[in-house]
Image (cartoon, rainbow, N blue to C red):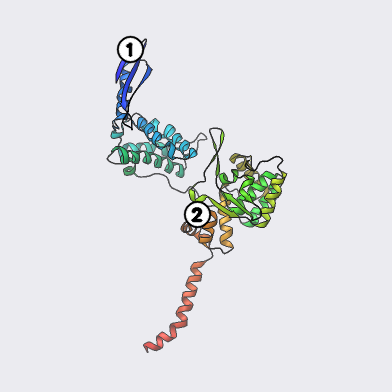
Amino acid sequence: MSVYKDGNKWRVIYRYTDSRGERKQSQKRGFSTKKEAQAWEREQMNKKESSLDMTFESFSEIYFSDMKKRLKENTYHTKEHILRTKLIPFFGKRKMCDIQPKDVVAWQNEMLEGSTKTGKNYSPVYLKTLHNQLSAVFNYAVRFYGLKENPAQKAGNMGKAKNREMLFWTQEEYKKFAEVMMDKPVSFYAFEILYWCGIREGELLALTPADFDFEKQTVSITKSYQRINRQDVITEPKTPKSNRTVKMPDFLSDEIQDFIGQLYGIGENDRLFEITKSYLHHEMDRGSKIAGVKRIRIHDLRHSHISLLIEMGFSAVAIADRVRHESIDITYRYAHLFPSTQNEMAGKLSSLRNEGGDADVNEES
């Protein structure tokens, strides 16, 4: 690389070998001082040589360049926002090789004292998400760039995986809410699908008429809706396993068929619900207040669907297949909702012991 005077500014011309082994040349202009140009030159050399003398900010650029095509678009934007607003401001100018666990602890303390625009402290779930992203960057450096150890891992995590207890509506509570929603058909039918099919919010908002088979009374879940940079984006579902076909109850199949018939000019591949997640949240506020039922999150309708299936006596395996959870997750997360199997188990064990108890005593005599 070379630094040259360029009028009142400075420029850097640098040559490098790319990953295919081909020689390349590029340049950057506009540096105010020679010192700035030389500093930028050194940083580029560190990046090209994969030297961990590079700054955290520079390594973050490499990390995202490598990862961008491997991530879903909404995941990429979430990670990029965390790096830009929470990690780079603290670690950005530090060399990767110099960041120690104590530095991570100092950052954690700053985040623990941090707050949102409304003045609320960051939630435990958000704090855990921040730490996980920092750890992911260092793990990448360990795995591919020769960093000896992950300082975020040594420092230990912060926050927790679950933010608050799981809420759900009983069937009676949902019926009260649904009656209120009938004044707005788009809201009523959206919540009907969420409650009676247990699908996710993004999956609902991506549905098109082509996804429904009214002869078989099914709806196919193959995509998800996201709002990214003020644009509507349709992505793949949350996980590959989320692709599924859900059988609808007959009344819901009839309702949705009627609803589609009311939508003049809708195409087979047009979104059925041209609404946003914020609209659904507003309607949840409105409906729960008028109906006099507790306010739950939109995602809690999925919990409500699962709890209803448990109450109806379906097994964890059958429920998991419908909502595409692991059956062990259903068993663990919803254990408190299943019938009192512990009492039933103990009772049957007692009966079994009592049935054979006398015989055992006689044999010993």
Comparing 35 with 267, the one in front is 267
Residue 150, visible in the rendered structure: no
The secondary element bearing badge 2 is classed as: loop
Left or right of 309 on screen, residue 77? left
Task: Name which residue type carries label 1.
Answer: Lys
Q: Is residue 163 above or below residue 11?
A: below
Name the residue tied to disc 2: 325
Going by the image, does 256 lie left or right of 343? right
Local packing at callout 2 (Cα closer than 10 Å; few below 14, some 14-19, many 20+) is some
Considering every residue shown, the one lying at the far top of the view is 7
Q: Residue at x 46, y 75 (%)?
A: 349
Q: Position of residue 302 (x, y in %)?
A: 56, 52
- Name the residue beneath numbered marker 1: 5
Q: Which mark is residue 81?
A: none
Of residues 114 and 174, the one drawn nearer to the viewer in this rendering:
174
324 vs 154, left or right, is: right
* Residue in view at x 56 percent, y 63 percent: 314
Q: Are marks 1 and 2 in contact (CB under 8 Å)?
A: no
Could you tell me how far apart the alpha carbons at marks 1 and 2 are, in whole angstroms?
62 Å
Placement of 27 over or under 116, stated as above or below: above
Count neighbours of disc 1 (C-alpha within 10 A) and say few if under 14, some if 14 to 19, many if 20 or more: some
Q: Secondary structure at mark 1?
A: strand
Q: Residue at x 51, y 33 (%)?
A: 117
